Image (tube, rainbow, N blue to C red):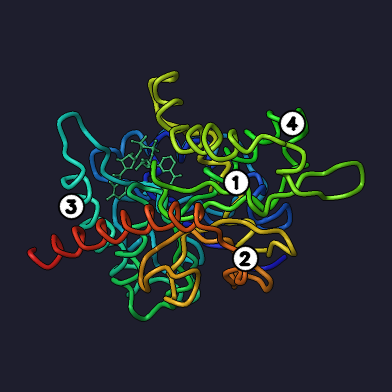
Amino acid sequence: MADPVIVVITGAAGQIAYSLLYNVAKGDVFGKNQKVVLRLLDIGPMMGVLKGVEMEINDCAFPLVSDVVATDDPGTAFSGADVAMLVGAMPRREGMERKDLLKANAKIFKSQGECIDKVAKKSIKVVVVGNPANTNALICAQSAPSIPRENFSALTRLDQNRAQAQVAAKLGIACDAVKDIVIWGNHSSTQFPDLSYAKVLDGEDWVEASSKIQDDDWIHNEFVKTVQTRGAAVIAARKLSSAMSAAKAIGDHVKDWWNGTGPRIVSMGVMSDGKSYGIEEGLMYSFPVKIEGKGVYKIVEGLNINDWQRKMMDVTAEELSNEKKDAFQFLLSE
Ligand code: NAI
């Protein structure tokens, strides 16, 4: 058996981590033959709760878990780490402005990036989940200059999974009979869930999703709105934000990044290179990607973009550009 993969999960005492840890520990992410070391990071006041999470992991007697470390010290958590799932973030409290949230989180992700830069493996793969995920991922990447930009990403897989489930429900088919949906831009209500290249299984053949849906109005309006506002709908119903589905999406994202996607298109927030789809360089923007070799994604180039898509893609890019400006302004004024 290969050496254990050292996996850091931040926000480990929180609700997403509670599902995520189970998925990682039982082999859903790195495979049923891959041992893992779990490093659980949270803040000091949560150490009591985290102790309980650690006790439960031990009580599961997972054969693949070779060690569990629960800590509030980022240096201990990130030391020699192969993968980091950065879930922990400052939550938005009542009365808090969006800018306050951005500021609090800019600080957290800057210091975590600096720590990763110092002590993690240079090959570490980092997925940022804590919101605002894309901008936090950008700050983290910029704070870790010795680690390649391509090793940082932001989670938009939950949006992709939500979109896939909406199409499956619309057509009365299974979720795995839907593929190649693209999420463009920010993990926020400006994101653009796009069915232009999506395919669905018709018998043995993959066919254009739109030719089966036959409802352009739904594709342009209800579908987009439903996916954009799904997080808020879950909060309204559950009085808590998405957790099981977020954990599943983090697992999907990392599993694909680790093992490859083959010809499937998936969406990841990745650093824009300024050459892809007219998106300004240096934004952590969600693009369609394929992962061919282990751990190396490529933006899928050459997809046709019509005027409606262009507008939708630019709206979410503009939001990211503004978030970036605000976040870096805070960091400079520190
Ligand atoms: P939660 O509030 O249950 O848990 C967050 C945990 O993070 C808490 O235990 C907290 O103490 C910890 N934390 C805060 N600052 C930390 C730091 N500096 N280092 C380590 N841990 C720290 O929240 P939940 O539901 O688990 O969500 C976590 C984050 O994920 C939120 O920001 C949420 O908005 C975001 N999210 C992102 C999604 C995406 O698709 N990108 C989907 C769903 C949630």
Please state if 81 lies on the left or on the right of 332 as rendered: right
Kindly report the distance in space between the C-alpha atoms of the residues bearing marks 1 and 4.
34 Å
Q: Which residue is mark 1?
A: 25
- Marks 3,4: beta carbons within 8 A: no
Are dots 2 and 4 in contact, CB under 8 Å? Answer: no
**Residue 8 place in picture, x, y as percent:** 45, 56
Q: Which residue is mark 2?
A: 303
Q: Which residue is mark 3?
A: 103
Q: Amino acid at mark 2?
A: Leu
- Residue 158 horizontal/vertical position (percent): 53, 43
| Rendering quarter of residue 3 | bottom right
Q: CA distance from mark 2 to mark 4?
A: 25 Å
> How packed is label 2: few (under 14 Cα within 10 Å), some, or many (20 or more)?
few
Q: Nearer the viewer, residue 39 or 199?
A: 199
Nearer the camera: disc 1 or disc 2 = 2
Name the side, left or right, on which 241 lies relative to 175. left
For numbered disc 4, what is the local secondary structure? helix
Q: Which mark is residue 171?
A: 4
Q: Position of residue 40 (x, y in %)?
A: 42, 49
Location of the C terminus (image quadrant): bottom left
Three-letter amino acid code at the position of disc 1: Ala
Contact between marks 1 and 2 (CB within 8 A): the answer is no
